[in-house]
Amino acid sequence: MKNVLITGGAGFIGSNFVRYLLEHEPGVHIVNLDALTYAGSLENLRNLPDPARHTFVQGDIRDRPLVDMLIEKHKLDTIVHFAAESHVDRSIAGPAAFIETNIIGTFQLLDAARAAWMDGRAARPGVRFHHVSTDEVYGSLGPDDPPFTEQTPYSPRSPYSASKAASDHLVRSYAHTYGLPVTISNSSNNYGPNQFPEKLIPLMILNGLRGKRLPVYGDGRQIRDWLHVTEHCEAIRLILKSGVVGETYNIGGGNQPTNLSIVKQICALLDERFPESPHCPHERLIEFVADRPGHDLRYAMDTRKIRSTLGWQPRQTLAAGLRETIDWYIGHLDWLKAVDEQGDYQLWITENYAQRG
Ligand code: NAD
Ligand code: DAU
């Protein structure tokens, strides 16, 4: 791993990964290809460690000539593919962009990697395509079902998860048919710095701070498996260094409270941090709103494979991670203002509320 293309590196997880790789891999040069959609921001790439080893390119992963040019010009040997449309609610409101970026975009990247790296079925030494995917491809669990393993059959249920499942299938088809050296990781819900405030945790923190209502979908009893973003980055680096080509690794935090319980935890932390706030107790702001259509009940990940084969394990408790994340948002209101200035945050919140009455 010398010259790495990171796609979507101005988004939430991608930008954390750029920072993490610069800190932990002193020999690596990064080319960061990101279209800077509403979810991507150069604010996420401020004050990088050793910025001389990071080249930012604003562009679309579907732009094949651009991708071909980058692979050749920078002698790229590794692709870590984060770029995607990532928000389930948006995929329900407007699925087309998800098909374009998540399916067509992944196809263009795979095909560019094949053209540049493969000679028949033989790959240039040391090359790797790592695809970042999600637990949502496995479907939804009942309350007592065992967690998803890497063998769980795919059963995506939203346009977002269906588009990610399609991209996973394409990646596997390029490995099987052409011999492209790939790895795939399927992660559970991430939280932490730089997450765009349309997702549950930052939305609740920022609405709570502003005294706005905290919209809990349905009865709030859905369950996600929460993972701190830094621990996701650690897992991906381990897979790049020691993962077996052709393999898939599940990644999850093992933190599985209900949505309502997370929102209540955030409220309690805000009460503790701002006892003088007029919005205390913040729980008063909770409002049950109409459910997400087709809302998946529960995700949980069986992470025994990555733990036993690569020695990865999450260490952060959700309580500590939430406290740290709240502090990060409070300490980065300039970041929020920059993201907000794009207009989309307010717009999305407004539309989101309107949709649910
Ligand atoms: P994000 O929405 O925060 O960032 C996505 C980034 O991709 C943005 O910077 C955006 O500008 C860029 N992008 C979008 N379309 C593009 C295109 N056509 N060309 C180039 N760049 C484009 O997403 P995230 O939460 O950081 O997720 C990153 C990846 O991880 C996604 O593939 C997602 O499916 C996966 N994932 C996310 C989570 C999570 O909890 N957030 C969990 C598991 C897997
Ligand atoms: O599981 C991994 C997935 O996690 C990733 O693949 C996706 O990219 C990422 O967006 C995330 O999807 P979710 O739909 O699980 O995340 P979200 O933060 O949108 O919602 C988390 C839960 O909280 C979900 O059950 C819906 C609920 N929710 C969400 C919002 C935004 C609410 O109750 N109220 C809200 O306002």
Image (spheres, rainbow, N blue to C red):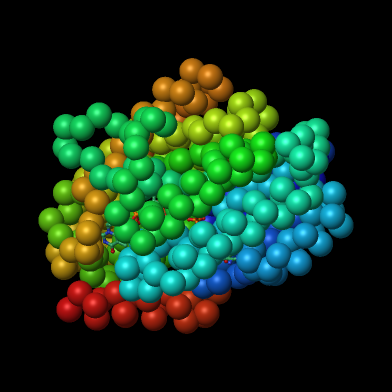
Q: How many marks?
A: 0
Location of residue 154 (image quadrant): top left
**Residue at 53% from the left image edge and 19% from the top image edge:** 309
Residue 47 at x, y = what percent? 70, 57
Q: Is residue 167 visible?
A: yes
Q: Quadrant of the C terminus?
A: bottom left
Q: Ligand 2 is located in which of the four quadrants?
A: bottom left
Location of residue 69 (image quadrant): bottom right
Q: For the view shown, which residue lies furthest in the top direction?
A: 308
Residue 213 at x, y = what percent? 23, 70
**Residue at 68% from the left image edge and 47% from the top image edge:** 79
**Residue at 52% from the left image edge and 79% from the top image edge:** 342
Residue 64 at x, y = what percent? 71, 65
Residues 127 and 328: in front is: 127
**Residue at 78% from the left image edge and 44% from the top image edge:** 117
Residue 293 shown left or right of residue 245 in the figure: left
Residues 338 and 158: in front is: 158
Residue 229 shown left or right of residue 226 in the figure: right
Residues 264 and 355: in front is: 355
Residue 345 at x, y = what percent? 43, 74
- From the viewer's perspective, is residue 231 above or below residue 17? above
Q: Quadrant of the N terminus?
A: top right
Q: Is residue 332 visible?
A: no
Residues 30 and 133: in front is: 133
